[in-house]
Image: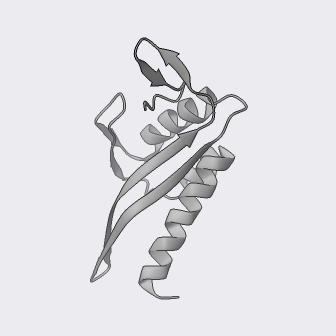
Amino acid sequence: MTEDKEIKAVLDRYRTAVYSKDVDAFIELYDEDARVFDLWGRWLYSGSADWRKTAEEWFGSLGPDRSSPEFHDVHIELGDGLASVHEARVCECRHWARVSEERVCECRHSR
């Protein structure tokens, strides 16, 4: 498998873990010392253990519903023993509710 295909396989594993709400499979994608930058709630999570708490809350907030992430404009940069990926990610949720003038779902995404 080429490195490019390996990276795409990781994105597929991410998508599957989120849709299945499988916290263990989701956290397995991150190194123990990963630094995760997020736009919801908190900017930086230090380490996969810290990130696990957020994943548990996110998946738990979905109840019986599912989130299905889609990746757009994926750019993969490969170097010596290092890969960088950036993309636009959209999570489709199946339980939208109107709050004021904004449609918001329980897993903190807005549309």
Residue situated in front as seen by the camera: 31 or 85 = 85
Q: Does residue 103 sit above or below 32 in this rendering?
A: above
* Quadrant assignment for the C terminus: top left
Q: Percent position (x, y) of residue 69? A: 53, 51
Residue located farthest toward the bottom when viewing the structure as drawn: 1
Q: Percent position (x, y) of residue 41? A: 35, 27
Residue located farthest toward the right when viewing the structure as drawn: 64
- 32 relative to 27 in the view: left or right: left
- 109 relative to 27 in the view: left or right: left
Residue drawn at x 45%, y 59% is 71
Q: Percent position (x, y) of residue 24? A: 62, 49
Residue drawn at x 42%, y 81% is 4
Q: Does residue 74 sit above or below 19 in this rendering?
A: below
Residue situated in front as seen by the camera: 16 or 89 = 89
Residue drawn at x 48%, y 72% is 8
Residue situated in front as seen by the camera: 83 or 85 = 85
**Colouring style:** one colour
Residue drawn at x 48%, y 24% is 104
Where is residue 9, by image quadrant?
Answer: bottom right
Residue located farthest toward the front when viewing the structure as drawn: 101
Q: Does residue 45 sit above or below 60 in this rendering?
A: below
Q: Percent position (x, y) of residue 89? A: 41, 52
Residue situated in front as seen by the camera: 42 or 5 = 5
